[in-house]
Amino acid sequence: MADTSNRTLRLLSLLQARRFWSGGDLAGRLDVSLRTLRRDIDRLRDLGYPVEARPGVDGGYSLAPGAALPPLVLDDDEAVALAVGLQAAAQAPVAGMAESSVQALAKVVQVMPARLRRRVDALREVTVPAGWGSAAPSVDPSVLTSVALACRDAERLRFAYTDASGADSERLVEPFRLVPAGRRWYLVAYDVDRGDWRSFRLDRLSRPTGTGARFAPRTLPAEDAAAFVRAGIVAAVPTVRVQARVHAPADDVRQRIGRWAAVEELGTDSCRVTMAAENLDWAVFALGVTGAEIDEVAPAELLEQLGEWGARFTAAVNR
């Protein structure tokens, strides 16, 4: 019985990790026969999980939205609270929190019945966010989850987009990754019509619709999606290149400001931080977030800015 229960949980995890599986692939992953797989699928259905089967040569299984949430997981109120909380966390500046929140939100929305989605939308519409990030352009959570699912499933995506000049266009893309940068979300994708890689701000994106067409992932012309987005921001916005040595382990600094800056390890207890800042106040803030001593600061204007901030804080302490 224990082996059967463990296999059932593994089957559920596989179904949540991908939108569609062939019967042969699933049976191979679980190391069981197709007959045993069908029994395991029936067991999940008995537990309330809406597993759909597609017959034929191209047949297989997928986890579909259901009339009710699966039992022994969450009740309705808990599911609504979880979805609203994840939407809020997706906008949070905490390192690593936003990405994980979107992934979890996509899983919840995938199996959430329509009546609960309406409750989530209603709560979101009457909720006013607070905090330093609230001034950033808002992103519709349904856009976040739709794009996240398309990235996960390697499914071509259509959407309407308004660029920085206000021009509207329709885009067909092969979505690659979602990247939170500062207080904004970006989609890194291959633009099929333009034949090149692009990054799209999600607050300028609307009506994302999956086409059902799958694609083989292409090679991104950058170290990773975050580096691609940073390069695009630097090219589009006038910036000042700043640099400083931070007396703290590189891994610690990356956890605090890694999404805004490049961090180069210099030793076990120091690293060099390089960033392109739209203004020097932002650079001062980022360096302050490291919580460590700094030196070898450049350019000279940044040293002056640090002095001005330090004088104001010192005056406040001495009052």
Image (cartoon, rainbow, N blue to C red):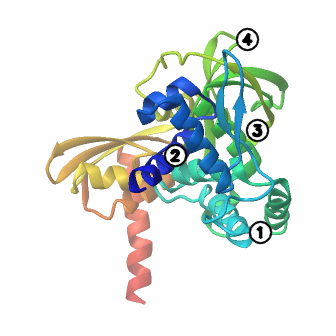
Residue 251: percent from left, percent from top: 27, 50
Nearest to N terminus: mark 1 or mark 3: 1
Which badge, 2 or 4, comes first in the chain's sequence? 2
Image-based side of 122 in relation to 84, left or right: right
Side of 60 where 207 appears, left or right: right
Determine whether the residue tagged by mark 2 lies in a helix, strand or loop: helix
Along the viewing direction, whichever of 59 and 88 lies nearer the viewer: 59
Q: With respect to residue 161, does 284 lie above or below?
A: below
Residue identifier under label 4: 193
Relative vertical location of residue 178 with respect to residue 34 in this rendering, above or below: below
Query: Label 1 vs label 4: CA separation?
Result: 38 Å
Tag shown at residue 13: 2
Callout 3 amino acid: Arg
The residue sitting at 61% across, 50% down in the picture is 44
Q: Mark 2 or mark 1: name the one nearer the start of the chain.
A: 2
Residue highlighted by disc 1: 128
Residue wearing tag 3 = 204
Q: Nearest the camera: 211 or 129? A: 211
In the displayed structure, 223 sits above or below 81; it is: above
Q: Looking at the image, which residue is at 67% across and 70% down? A: 78
Tell me which amino acid carries mark 1: Val
C-alpha gap between disc 4 and disc 3: 19 Å
Provide the secondary structure element on which disc 4 rests: loop
